[in-house]
Image (tube, helix red, strand yellow):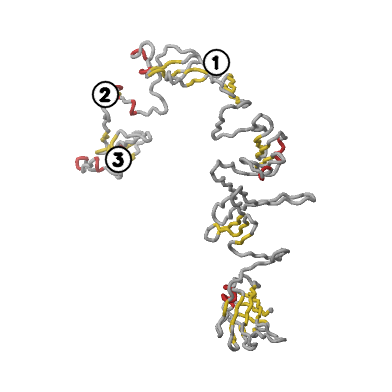
Amino acid sequence: MAEITSLSTLAKTSVDANEFLLVANSSTKAAKKLQLQTLFPAVSTAGTSSETLYTSATLTNKNQIVFKGIASGDTGLLTVATTSSNIVLTVLEAGIDLSLCNNATSGFLTAVDFSGTVTGTCAVTNGGTGLSTIVKGAILYASADDAISATSAMSTDGQLLIGHTANGYPSVATLTAGSNMTVTNGGGSITLAASLSSLAANLDTGSFNIDLNTNYISDDGSDRGIYVHTNGKTILNDSGSTLTTGDATGQLNIQGTTTTAIKIGNSGAYQANYDITTTTSASGTNGAKLQIYAGTAGGGDKAGGTLALFGGTATGSGAGGNVDVLAGDAASGTPGSVQLRTYTTGGSATTAVTVDSSQDVTVESGNLFVSAKPIYARASSTAAFIQYQGAPATTDDGTTAVSAANILTGIVQCTPTADRSKATDTASNLVSGLDLTADNDSFDFSFINLTTDGQDNVTLTGGTGVTLVGNMVIHAQDATDDAVSIGVGRFRIRRTGASAVTMYRIG
């Protein structure tokens, strides 16, 4: 057996899991081995989310524990000392600053003892009211700078705090009822009732409505004047009637007497029975214009409003009402005219038709189209038609074409010295030059052969797009007995297309 003195030395820091001690049981004499490193202490922290009292490398030489020191983070608030083997932590109250603390959920102060700083009544400057007593029902107010006073007890129904300029602070008072107003004060309530039985002053409603409650705005309090029906329609009535008149059609119903339905301003002799007029102007001043406009479209592809005038419908055997458009009369000057005007494409207002004081109707611009009915000329004592005839056109003694401008004069004449063949203008030129704007529009003209020898003839041929129907030879005049030629031909040009016409011999 080896002697202990001959064994090598095992340092504590070199002990590992393979080092054991021999242990014998005194009773059983059984021998066992004990792992040597289990005899060294181990350190742990029992609490959770807490600081350890030892350092992370707390054990040295397998059995030495290193503890942390305890120090104050703010020696003005907390001190650390050792007394009688105890660590003593002392809080310094004088170092606590409450402004740095969170007082959102609970107050730090539960009571204030004024006995040390305030004597008698707490003044306003100390956060008090300056009052030692206050009666029931009084209201506090600032009567001066840094001064709080109490009103008298508000013990009367309807009392309010009402501003008082002279005092500079409010006074306790009740509302005063003015004209056409009743004030009723109750416990915790004020009722204002308007009485409009005799309204003398101006009524300014601001942005509020007036409910007439099935009554009129009248000059004498009777059922006449302006009435707004429950269906939202407005009625102007000059005599007593039932309120069911609001059932009439239209948003504004003016129900006058049988002689005057609508009257605006003064009336003259003609307007005595039915009129919308402007007020007569002062002497030396032109009469005021009266204009009625339909609504302007709001933009886009929307059309402007239509202005329609309708005569009354006769539901029985009587005649329907007329629509009269009458120009103004004149005492010594020229009476006015009735004008029909429209805008051109360029936006210029242009008169199309005028009916003057002689009752002459003039088409001043544009064409007169009669699409479905004939034109009747029934004058028995005057000519049926008077039309303009300018100087006839003369075409040369040659082959020059008969132009649309020649034909437009209505009469084309020629004095040939030999037989001549003359073409017409092209169909396109005839359509545009004669203003044949639609198919089947036509124009009549005469061609006169002024030669009197009975043998020098003019033969018309068709220009481009012109179709000829009938005898196109205009013979020279022959004055002998039984002559067959008077030297004139009558022709009609009919449009058949944008660039096509047919010319007929009709006489």
Provide residue 479's location: percent of width, then percent of height. 67, 85
Question: Closer to the N terminus: mark 1 or mark 3?
Answer: 3
Task: Tell me the mark number nearer the camera, choosing from 1 and 2.
Answer: 1
Residue contact at pointers 2 and 3, CB within 8 angstroms: no
Towards the viewer: 221 or 395: 395
Q: Amino acid at mark 3?
A: Gln
- Residue 85's disc number: 2
Give the residue at the far right of this rendering. Answer: 317
Residue named by callout 3: 37
Residue named by callout 1: 156
Residue in the picture at 63% in, 54% down: 357
Residue 303 falls in image quadrant: bottom right
Q: Badge 2, how many Cα within 10 Å: few under 14, some, many 20+?
A: few
Task: Tell me the mark number nearer the camera, choosing from 2 and 3.
Answer: 2
- Residue 231's disc number: none
Task: Tell me the mark number nearer the camera, choosing from 1 and 3.
Answer: 1
Q: CA distance from mark 1 to mark 2?
A: 77 Å
Secondary element type, mark 2: loop
Towards the viewer: 304 or 115: 304
Secondary element type, mark 3: helix
Q: CA distance from mark 2 to mark 3?
A: 32 Å
Provide residue 426's location: percent of width, then percent of height. 57, 79
Towards the viewer: 84 or 99: 99
Q: CA distance from mark 1 to mark 3?
A: 96 Å
